[in-house]
Amino acid sequence: MPLCKNDGLEMYKRMLRIRLFEEKAVQLFQEGSMPGRVFPCTGEEAVSAGVSMHLDDHDYITSTHRPNGHLIAKGISLKEMMAELFGKNEGSCAGKGGPMHIADIEKGILGANGIVGGGFPIAVGAAFAHHYKKQRGVAVCYFGDGATNQGTFHEALNLASIWSLPVIFVCENNSYGMSMKQEDHQRIADIVERAPAYRIPAEIVDGNDAAAVFEQAGKAVKKAREGEGPCFLECKTYRKTGHSAEDQQAYRPENELSQWQSKDPIQRLSRLLQEEEEVQSNELLMVEQEIKREIEEAVEFAYESASPQPGDALLHAFCR
Ligand SMILES: Cc1ncc(C[n+]2csc(CCOP(=O)(O)OP(=O)(O)O)c2C)c(N)n1
């Protein structure tokens, strides 16, 4: 499914929303206003934006410790998300999930996960539910290159394969697991090599090219919806910031970041929209201003929301 102007603009909005939301969250964290931690996905936004364009609220996603992009692209309210990062009552999990276990079940967001590889069994279970109930929904499982060394990865691919489940495994290969380069933690250059062992169709995608992700994800979601079983996408991308907001990144080789600078996914999509879809630069500027406003409102909402009281610890143990 090639990209049209409206889809391109919608993806641009989602990517910019992710980028600017995270920049604000990092700023609030670094100045000491926001508790918890922030794991930015700066530079990786095209992956979640391109995939989520094919999903609706009935489709599930599972996320990771780096969840902001996945959740914002899937449509979580920025206000509830910001309030959750602040641990406030009005947060999407009443402040009990925080940055690493934030969820929004009504939006099909089954949660971020502090356990690397923790999302695999949840995504397979969710896909099984759709399959068992004969629904057309799919489950998308996002994970990093580091997570593909976990046992849960192999168990999930195996079950999804033998039961032909509607799950799309989306590997965001951002070249690092914390401070460790991918080439230092596994012998393979392409993680897709692992999929044929489970007879799962797999593609390598340029994860910094939103149009390419959109196209490949569209095919994968369509196949899964039509009962053709799981798919695997390895989206090659690059994390432009530290592993977390406090990471000094001493491990990053000189020049590596600058080499990726020209491949920035948001700048790339902006160029494509202007050069091929006749989008005017002031239209993109207006989008940016609108998103900045949304984010300021989200911060205000978070500050104004009340903090949970000690007795609230006994609420929401099983449901919100
Ligand atoms: C089971 C488990 N082992 C180790 C960790 C510590 N840890 C947190 S993030 C991370 C790296 C994960 O790398 P990757 O899956 O590539 O995701 P990325 O951070 O690159 O998005 C590790 C090892 C953890 N949270 N859970």
Image (cartoon, grey):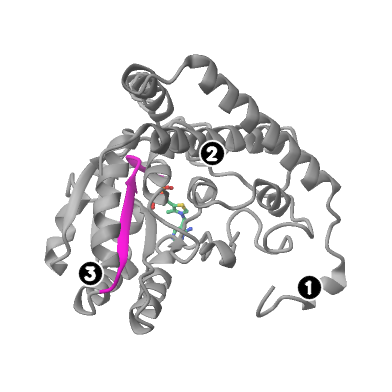
For the residue pair 130 and 309, the one nearer the viewer reads as: 130
Please tell me whether mark 1 or mark 3 is closer to you in this view.
Answer: 3
Q: Can you give x and y, in whole percent of width and height, for residue 218 in the image? A: 29, 51
Estimate how packed mark 1 is, as few (under 14), some (14 to 19) or many (20 or more) residues with alpha carbons within 10 Å.
few
Which residue in the structure is indicated by mark 1? 313
Q: Is residue 295 magenta?
A: no
Q: Which residue was labeled with disc 3?
A: 229
Note whether ligand 1 is within 8 Å of mark 3. no
Picture quarter with the N terminus: top left
Q: Circle 2 is placed at which residue position?
A: 18
Mark 1 residue element: helix
Could you say where residue 309 lies in the image, as x and y percent from the top left? 87, 66
Residue 172 painted magenta: yes
Q: Looking at the image, which is closer to me, 237 or 274?
A: 274
- Split into 4 quadrants, where in the image is the C terminus? bottom right
- How many angstroms separate mark 2 from mark 1 (CA)? 30 Å
Which amino acid, by three-letter code, is at mark 2? Ile
Residue at image position (33%, 78%) is 131
- Type of the residue with mark 3: Gly
Look at the picture and state if 74 lies above or below 161.
above
Report how far apart the C-alphas of labels 1 and 3 lie in the structure.
Answer: 41 Å
